Amino acid sequence: ILWTPTGSEQFGNGLSDVLFGSVSPSGRLNMTWYASDDDLPEITDYRVKSAGRTYMHFKGEPTFEFGYGLSYTTFELENIKREDVQGVNALKNGYNSPECIENRKKYYETCEDKMIKVTADVINTGDTESDVVIKAYANGKLAGFTKEKALTAGERREIQILIDIDDVRSYDEASKKMVADPSPEIKLEI
């Protein structure tokens, strides 16, 4: 089964390139495909966590999960490293101004100027040149990604993904603020 949700002027040419092997596919799903409508909560139930909505909270086995994709080759990740980086947001215009700090305090439990730098080597272990998408999840939430173009068979390339600590906060009901995990679990996926 081939599902094509959108068309465009060059869609037919691109599709034939993938189907006949001229180009290796590297796209990823931006949604979860559930196995059955029965896996979904009632349409009037707007609770995200307890109702199991979104790829982050669904407990069942989907047909295709968020981020799923195929390729005509295979990839591996090696030498995965994580480093906390301080002071990177100071480069943003006005990030450390008194007004900006005061505004962040209204919504955030802490105001950290911190990013997590994740590096790894991605290796094309197959026989076909292909692009590859590497996704970084922090505590199960998509926090960043990178797309590397045209890795030839056997090629090794170092990748880097920066994760802003502000992007991996979660809402705390008790404090009514966004709370940062100072050391979220980071997972890379291809």
Image (cartoon, rainbow, N blue to C red):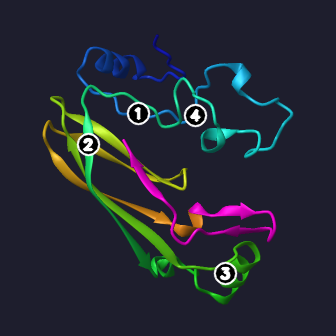
Q: Amino acid at mark 3?
A: Cys
Please tell me which of labels 1 and 3 falls first in the chain.
1
Tell me which residue sits at (54%, 50%) in the image. Answer: 140
Tell me the quarter of the picture where residue 133 sits. Answer: top left
Q: Nearer the viewer, mark 3 or mark 4?
A: 4
Q: Which residue is mark 1?
A: 27
Give the mark, 3 or 2, whose residue is nearer the N terminus.
2
Marks 1 and 3 close (CB-CB < 8 Å): no
Disc 2: CA contacts within 10 A as few (<14), some (14-19) or many (>=20): some
Camera-nearest label, 1 or 3: 1
Q: Which residue is mark 2?
A: 76
Q: Is residue 22 left or right of residue 179?
A: left
Q: Which residue is mark 4?
A: 31
Q: Which residues are magenta?
A: 168-190
Q: For residue 177, what is the image quadrant?
A: bottom right
Identify the disc placed on residue 100. Answer: 3
In the picture, measured across the screen, residue 52 lies left or right of residue 63, that is right
Mark 4 residue crowding within 10 angstroms, few (<14) / some (14–19) / many (20+): few
Q: Position of residue 127 (x, y in %)?
A: 15, 29
What separation in Å lies between label 3 and label 2 (alpha carbons)?
Answer: 41 Å
Give the mark toward the camera: 3 or 2. 2
Asked if the magenta segment contains residue 184, the reply would be yes
Q: Nearer the viewer, residue 43 or 6?
A: 43
